[in-house]
Image (cartoon, grey):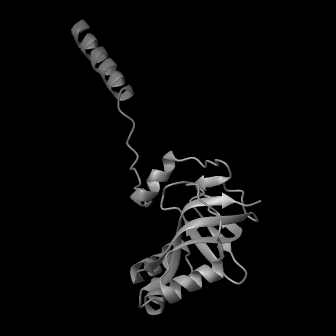
Amino acid sequence: MILRNLFIAAVVIVSIVACNNQAAPKVAETKSEEPEECKKEDALTPTLVDGFYGAAFDTAKAMSLEEATRFYKVKGVKDAKISGTIETVCQSKGCWFDLKGASTSQTIDFGHKFLMHKDLAGKKVIACGSFYNDTTTVEQQIHEAVEDAKSMTMEQAKKKFTTPLISVGFQATGVKLVN
């Protein structure tokens, strides 16, 4: 009888210890949909040196946004220094901003090389860099409309977006705060 009670007690103790040492169930990790190149920005901090974000450059001969865009579209001149006012800055990381010209706006990105502070809306700047043609595939347009903006159904998006969207982009190597 004593052996039986000792055996039962041992089983109970082993069961309690085993239950308390079980690893917590693993929560399934969700994969980040952030592109790999965007993850490089996580190691960056916005740095302003002598009024410049990114690489310093000679600010002479800066053009208006409209004039520089026209030179790119008509003559194929990619490299430019464009001036304008910051309309909005990426509030996630500071990895792009919208530059407002006299009659148009242009999104300026930094090629994942540097970041800006997020509170610069309304500041006058000169951005030095290059224009490029940016293509948004049909699949990307559908994804953005259905998943990101949630502005339409998949069927509506497939009917609306049937050709790639080609737009003009500008990638800055440096940005100078003017005021």
**Is 98 positioned to the left or the right of 26 in the image?**
right
In what quadrant of the picture does the N terminus appear?
top left
Where is residue 167 shown, x and y percent of the image? 50, 82
> Which of the 4 image quadrants contains residue 179?
bottom right
| Front residue of this view, candidates 157 and 111 | 111
**Is 40 positioned to the left or the right of 66 in the image?**
left
**Is 25 positioned to the left or the right of 80 in the image?**
left
> Which of the 4 image quadrants contains residue 164?
bottom left
* x 43%, y 88%: residue: 158
Relative height, residue 101 to residue 54 (above, below): below
* Residue 152 seen anywhere in this rendered image of the structure: no
* x 57%, y 65%: residue: 128
Q: Residue furthest top?
A: 2
Relative height, residue 161 to residue 134 (above, below): below
Relative height, residue 155 to residue 36 (above, below): below
| Front residue of this view, candidates 11 and 79 | 79
> Which of the 4 image quadrants contains residue 121?
bottom right
* x 48%, y 91%: residue: 160
| Front residue of this view, candidates 114 and 9 | 114
Where is residue 14 shown, x and y percent of the image? 30, 20
Where is residue 44 shown, x and y percent of the image? 53, 47
* x 50%, y 80%: residue: 77
* Residue 8 seen anywhere in this rendered image of the structure: yes
